[in-house]
Image (spheres, rainbow, N blue to C red):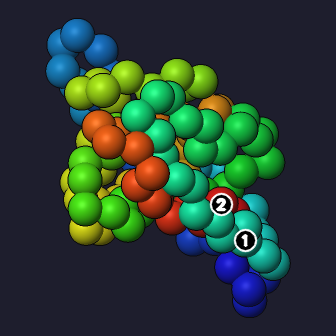
């Protein structure tokens, strides 16, 4: 965020347990950023590193800029048809709680995703 204003409260809904109860998590308030890192990653047909773990991460946005489905893994290794599916032509994820490593994979390889890390 270039204006260096504090982030508004950010919420993420997640299933909390086997009972299926919905739990609301509040991201720490008061964090701000004066810049972001914008990159593109060419995703391969083998697991490809997208982002390394970063405990200072405030938010990530990842957009599939290709004509093929891409699968993300919130770990060091991505597997086809598992994890987070980003549909072709703009499938996206925005996350403001995860600070670990992210990997991706696709069927044919050399497919671009765009990444913005704050």
- Residue most extreme to the left: 20
- Residue most extreme to the top: 18
Location of mark 2 (residue): 117
For this view, does 60 lie left or right of residue 90? right
Query: Does residue 112 appear in this view?
Result: yes
Residue 95: mark in rendering: none
Residue at 64 percent across and 65 percent down: it is 39
From mark 1 to mark 2, how far is it between C-alphas?
A: 6 Å
- In the rendered image, residue 6, in percent from the top left (x then y), is placed at 71, 74
Front-most of 82 and 20?
82
- In the rendered image, residue 66, in percent from the top left (x then y), is placed at 33, 63
Task: Determine contact: label 1, label 2, CB under 8 Å.
Answer: yes
Residue at 53 percent across and 53 percent down: it is 42
Front-most of 16 and 38?
38
Circle 1 sits in a helix, a strand or a loop, which is it?
loop
Circle 2 sits in a helix, a strand or a loop, which is it?
strand
For this view, does 69 lie left or right of residue 36? left
Front-most of 59 and 77?
77
- In the rendered image, residue 36, in percent from the top left (x then y), is placed at 72, 71
Location of mark 1 (residue): 36
Against 28, residue 4 (above or below) is: below
């Amino acid at each position: 965020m270039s204006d260096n204003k504090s982030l508004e409260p950010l919420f993420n809904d997640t299933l909390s347990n086997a009972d299926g109860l919905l739990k609301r998590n509040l991201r720490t308030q008061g964090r701000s950023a004066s810049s972001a890192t914008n990159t593109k990653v060419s995703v391969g047909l083998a697991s490809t590193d997208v982002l390394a773990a970063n405990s200072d991460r405030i938010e990530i946005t990842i957009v599939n800029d290709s004509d093929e489905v891409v699968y993300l893994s919130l770990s060091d290794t991505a597997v086809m048809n598992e994890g987070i599916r980003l549909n072709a032509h703009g499938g996206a994820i925005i996350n403001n709680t995860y600070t670990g490593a992210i990997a991706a994979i696709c069927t044919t390889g050399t497919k671009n995703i765009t990444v913005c890390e704050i």
